[in-house]
Image (spheres, helix red, strand yellow):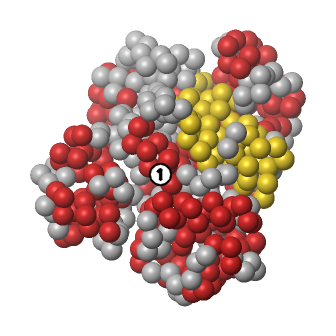
Amino acid sequence: MDDDSRYQAVRGRDERFDGVFFTAVVTTGIYCRPSCPATTPKRANVRFLPSAAAAQSAGFRACRRCRPDAVPGSAEWNARADAVGRAMRLIGDGVVDREGVAGLANRLGYSARQVRRQLVTELGAGPIALARAQRAHTARVLLQTTRLPITEVAFAAGFASVRQFNDTIRAVYDRTPSRLRATGPAAGRDAATDGSGVPLRLAYRGAYAAGAILDFLARRAIPGVEEVVGPPGARTYRRTLALPHGTGIAEVDESAGADGGRWLPCRLQLTDLRDLTCAVERVRRLFDLDADPYAVDERLGAHPLLAPLVAAEPGLRSPGAVSPEELAIRAVLGQQITVGAARTLGGRLVEALGKPLGRPDGGLTHLFPEPATLAEAPLTELGMPASRRETLRTVGAALAEGRVVLDPGADREEASAALLALRGIGPWTAGYVRMRALGDPDVMLTGDAGVRHGLALIGAAAGDAEDWRPWRSYALHHLWRATAA
């Protein structure tokens, strides 16, 4: 896009570009999302910036009407496999807050100077500014949805000092933290103190097939770690989370926002609020909330054999994972057996080796076992063949020792090669991990029985999948959906 086409998107209040670029108005000092309902500014007064962090670094304040800091992330950063895409995923996971820029650079295999140069070139802001923008958004959420003392909010959001927190909030929102808290919904502040956790709105763009996603997750929900409760159309997905500073429980509702907005209601119960940013990002990855359904459905819907499935389920997403390591273990459990059988095995594994919660919450009782725990376990309680148990131990050891890296910034090609080098790991397992744990939008599991049945159902051949690039992972989910796999 050039600036003229961006301006046309702003004039049309085109929400397809929310999160893709931001509009900064020089006469007001405010930046907005492209779909902001405010009066369209004159073209001469508008600048276009690639990130909220770039707008904030240039001295612009967030619009109070459209809240540009709360838009879905750009789908580009999740789809891209280069250093910038990997860096954005790591920053979203809170790596800069926990490990600094040096830690980010080390994970990417570049120098800190190279990482900063690449991010500034493409996003108009370096890693510190990008992390600062993220901290500001987290602080706003905590201020407006909890009654935590402001000092605790500052450190929970990741700020190093209260002064830094105050200065950032004033710069980004043109208000003191106290005034910003006063503008939050009173109902939200009350709800956050009744034991239900921090209430959130998880934004997405375009259509979202929430029912299909809940179906997918419900069929694979491992007892003790996950559950789906409630009647169809009003279900809630619940699961435990192992986080850098503690543990948590996430709840995401199937029904969209009550005001008709494009967001899913979510509640996070955390033992340490410093994990809020990380927990939000991991839940967003699980529900694939930063995807671009316009681009996906346009591409897949153009294929005559796949088009009926796309029309029947617009906005179908490709669910990710809250823990890549957990997903890798689950992929091994699912080798050459049905989804139901894999779920049963997962329940046995959790009961035997999972870490119990301090207090059970409904059907949630454990955290999923850590890779290091599996590496030395006999696993006889699973009732699996000895070769499969050995594969589980091998994968657990490789993950625990860092021989296989599956964090948000992992290089997909290197991770796939490392997995395939392990005994007992074949193309299906590596591909499934690549699709869900690493968020690759272009995976086609041609050896999967459900995929073969789906292709036969619509009269397609494996070669037709070449026309579905770069969104073959989404096509795969349409095929699974058609066969209820």
**Residue occupying image coordinates x 82% and y 43%:** 359
Q: Secondary structure at mark 1?
A: helix
The C terminus lies in quadrant: bottom left
Question: On the rendered structure, is 420 left or right of 110?
Answer: left
Residue toward you, 435 or 251 = 251
> Residue 455: x and y, percent?
21, 62
Q: Residue at x 43, y 65 (%)?
A: 338
Residue 207: image location, x then y, percent: 35, 34
| Residue 1 found in image quarter | top left
162 horizontally vs 453: left or right: right
Tell me if I can see residue 213 in this picture: yes
Q: Position of residue 120 (x, y in %)?
A: 56, 51
Please tell me which residue lies in front, 388 or 81. Answer: 388
The answer to whether residue 455 is above or below residue 364 is below
The residue located at (73%, 66%) in the rendering is 352
Name the image quarter holding residue 161: top right
Q: Is residue 320 above or below residue 175?
A: below
**Is 316 placed left or right of 367 in the picture?**
left
Q: Position of residue 277 (x, y in %)?
A: 68, 42
Q: Would residue 47 be visible to someone looking at this image?
A: no
Under mark 1, the amino acid is: Arg
Q: Residues within 10 Å of mark 1 (few under 14, many from 20)?
A: some
Label 1, on which residue?
Answer: 219
Front-most of residues 238 and 62: 238
Say if 354 sits above or below 277 in the image.
below
Q: Quadrant of residue 141?
A: top right
The residue sitting at 29% across, 41% down in the picture is 313
